[in-house]
Image (cartoon, rainbow, N blue to C red):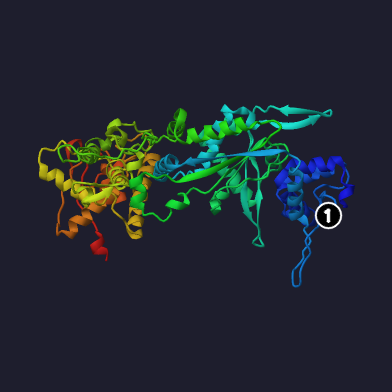
Amino acid sequence: MKPEKLTKKQKEELEKFGANTWFVESLYKQYEQKSEEVPDQWKNFFGNVENKNIGDSPYSSETTGFLTLPKNIEMPKPGTGDEVKVIAGSAQRILDNMNSSLTIPVATSQRTIAVKLLEENRIIINQHLQKKNEGKVSFTHIISWAILKGISKIASMNNAFTIIDGKPNIIIRKNVNLGLAIDIERKDGTRSLLVPNIKSANKLNFKEFWHAYDDIVVRSRKGTIDPAEFLGTTVTLTNPGTIGTVSSIPRLMIGQGAIIATGAIQYNAEYQAMSSSTISSLGISKVMNITSTYDHRIIQGAESGMFLREINELLLGKDGFYEEIFNLLKIPSRPMQWESDYQPGGFDNGIKTDEIIKQAKVLQLINMYRVRGHLLADLDPLGTRAVYHPELDPSSFNLTVWDLDRHFVTGGFGALKTATLREVINILQKTYCDKIGVEYMHIQNPAEKVWLQSKMEPSKNSPSFDNNIKKNVLKKLIKAELFENFIHTKFIGHKRFSLEGSETLIPVMDKILNQAAEYGIEEIVLGMSHRGRLNVLANIIGKSYEFIFSEFEDNKDPDTIQVSGDVKYHLGATGKYPTSMENR
């Protein structure tokens, strides 16, 4: 179809997809040739378009767009050996989009944001999510959330310009359809962008937004995005910083009020050759450039500037920005706060008093984790959020975000003479606040406390297991679980004390018995409570399932040791336990 034959209706249909038109065209071409390979939602969409009788489909690969060039412009000529290729298809559509975007009178605001707080709080968030196997939060997730919060304060950034009955109008939108520029690699290795949007993103909480964001990225790369998700974008975020771009001014598409671009998160060029110790000593933050390119007909420069200021302040913790995220994700700690750096200086009678005090605060923090760390341990299988404890907060000891990469004397903590505050906190949290909680500082014998510390802190209470050990633990857990399930379904109504909920007792006892064998111990006598006794008899002592189940039918083994009451959960047994040493 010739460009001059495009109808007004067809042009309007094309403009609805903006930067995504190339993708729609490529899918339509595939639909015409092999419709069975096109996702169902796009089959339905193209079928509906064809049934509207609006003439030739505007999505046909033959559509070449409507490029208008100024008169008398001198175009470059190819030289000897140059290759010339016609711009067509999706590349032609991108060209058309850029040309149509020139009709929008835009301006751009720019701001440089310190991202130290963003960086540190993201680390805390992802450490928590890693424990729960719940994925990962990116910088862009949090920045996008700040953009949505910023729009709630500067609502004009979400407006749009239109002409109705020949008169200019402002569309004041209630909801934010946040467009995400997603890099797509094609089969031939070339790259392009898709820009779907999250509908009514402003109505989601952070956790919902995070999952919606990841979902739309995954479906975009799989090619299963829905047509409706390309339409109605109000504000777009593009992040060329992921490939190292420091700052960019992208083109604004028709129908949107603003497009936000973020640059690379890095130190300014003049600091990039500095050592990490110098960086931390001077208190230098990485920075990120952010631009707001907006439709100047409906948005003023002051509004765009205030919008970027709002994003800056949010990323520095304004209005409980990080606290809201931490609460939704049930993170049992307080976010790091933006504070002025404090460097000890000056002397008191020849002594660097301030420096000594700061060093002492680190030792106090270590001691408080040893005393109170168990209060934050992740022990509840139902995921109940542990309570924040101020005595375990570095800020309670006047330690700030700027101290994290500075070295301090540890007093032998974790078998280290010195360590950064970050390393100290990491060891403390893994040792006392992970899946094992330890309360031991009440012990009166100092040697016993030191011995426990020497065993727990260097290993972070996280002994490493090879795959064979992990498989054996899983095998023991499965046997314990199957035993309980069988009794529960086969002998309904019989009185027993199940091990359910404490199945880890079986692999733990297996470990103890194996270690005992390594030390030459040949005989062990076990005395235990009712709960789980039957499981231990079967899976540790080696009492046969036949004898155990026959006892449920009141058929007692005459060789079984009979004790008080002779009820099933009192019955004992003797047996030989095959350890791993015997199996080798």
Specify whether 142 is left or right of 354: right
At a point 55% along the width and 54% down the height, the residue shown is 243
Q: Which residue is more in the foreground, 471 or 558?
A: 471
Looking at the image, residue 85 lies above or below residue 414: below
57 lies above or below 310? below
Rendered residue at 61%/48% (across/down): 182
In the rendered structure, the answer to whether residue 121 lies left or right of residue 190 reads left
Q: Position of residue 4 (x, y in %)?
A: 89, 48
Question: x%, y% of residue 89?
Answer: 77, 55
SS class, disc 1? loop
Q: Residues within 10 Å of mark 1 (few under 14, many from 20)?
A: some
Residue designated by label 1 = 62
To which quarter of the image does residue 533 belong? top left
Classify residue 248 as left or right of residue 280. Answer: right
Rendered-image quadrant of the C terminus: bottom left
Name the residue type under label 1: Glu
In the rendered image, residue 543, in percent from the top left (x then y), is placed at: 26, 51
Residue 547 visible in the snapshot: no
Quarter residue 251 falls in: top right
- Residue at horizontal 27 percent and vertical 32 percent from the top: 391
